[in-house]
Amino acid sequence: MNFSARRQRVRAILAGDVCVHPGSVFDPISARIAEDVGFEIGMFAGSIASFTVLGAPDIVVLTLSEFAQQIQRITRAGNLPLLVDADHGYGNALSVMRTVQELEQAGVAAMTIEDTLLPRAYGAAGAQLLSAEEGLGKIRAALAARRDPATVIVARTSAISISGLEDAIHRARLYAAAGADAMFFTGVSTVEELAAIHAAVGVPIVIGGSDGEFGGREGMAAQGVRIALQGHQPFMAAVQATYETLKALREGVSPKALTNQPSGALMKRVTREADYNAAMKDFMGL
C-alpha cells in the first residue's frame, strides 16, 4: 500500500461516525503487532520518540531528523497508517514547513502541530502558549507545505489547561477556518467541556485522553471525537519487561526459567520471516 492510500484511510476515519483508539507504537515490530491485531491507525508520540531514540525525558531535545528516521523505520515495516506528534514543528512557521516535508517523505499519514511554546522558555514555571496569531501561522504554513493533499494536518492546542476553554475554542475556530483537517485537544476533563468543543468546532476532534467519564467510544463519537488516545502503555510495558529480564539474568536466573519470552511462532510472524524465506527462494535459489 502506498503512503497516499494510508492517508486516505485516516481521512475515512475522520469522515466517519465512530471513534477509534490508535495503537501506540515505537518501532517496526510494535507497528506490525498493532497492525496484526487490528488497529486502524498507529500513533507515534513525541514523548515515546524521545524515550526510544534518545532515552531522554519528554522535554523536546529530539531533533527533526532523529524523529523522521525512526518514523521511516516504522512506516516501511508494514501498512499501518501512522499519526505522529510533531510537537511545535521544531521551530517557527518556516521550520513547520520543513517538518511537514520531512515527515511526509518518511511516510506519515497524519501529523499534529501544536501551539505550545516549545522548548520551555528560560525561567518559565509552567507551560506557555504561542499567541493565537503565531499558532495560526504555523497551521497555515503546514497546509501550504504538504505535497500530498491527502496528508492529514491536525492542529493541536493545550489551551484548555493553560488559558481556559474559551481560548481553546477561539484557537480551534481559527485553525479550522485556515483548513486544518482535525483538532487535537489535550486537557479535556469533563463531558461538558467536550460537548462545548463539539458544538463550537466544525472539524473532527482528536483527544488526548479517553476515560469512561466520556461515555466510552460511543459517547465520544457522539461528541465528534474520531480518534481518542489511550496512552502509551506498550512502550512502558516493554521497558518493564526488559528491566525485569535483565535483572533476573544478572541475579542468576537461568534463561530457560524466564517466563516472559515470546513464542518462536510469534517471532517469526512479527519479523515477517515467511516473506524473507519466499524472497530467498525466488531470488537466491534457497
Image: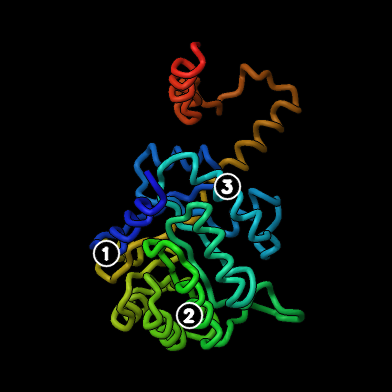
Q: Is residue 119 left or right of residue 223?
A: right
Residue that lies at the very extreme toward the top in this rendered image: 286
The answer for how far apart the CA atoms under marks 1 and 3 are is: 32 Å
User: Dot 3, how many residues are within 10 Å of its Cα: few (below 14), some (14-19), or many (20+)?
Assistant: few
The residue that disc 3 covers is: 236
Residue 13: % across, % down: 30, 58
Q: Nearer the viewer, residue 94 or 207?
A: 94
The residue that disc 2 covers is: 160
Residue 237: % across, % down: 56, 43
Quadrant location, the N terminus = top left
Amino acid at the residue labelled 3: Met
Amino acid at the residue labelled 2: Ile
Which residue is located at x 48 percent, y 71 percent?
186
Q: Secondary structure at mark 1?
A: helix
Q: Secondary structure at mark 2?
A: helix
Q: Is residue 59 left or right of residue 98?
A: right
Which residue is located at x 39 percent, y 51 percent?
41
Label whose residue precedes the other's in the sequence (2 or 3): 2
Residue 197: % across, % down: 35, 79
Q: Are marks 2 and 3 in contact (CB under 8 Å)?
A: no
The residue that disc 1 covers is: 15
Q: Is residue 250 left or right of residue 126?
A: right
Q: Quadrant of residue 127?
A: bottom right
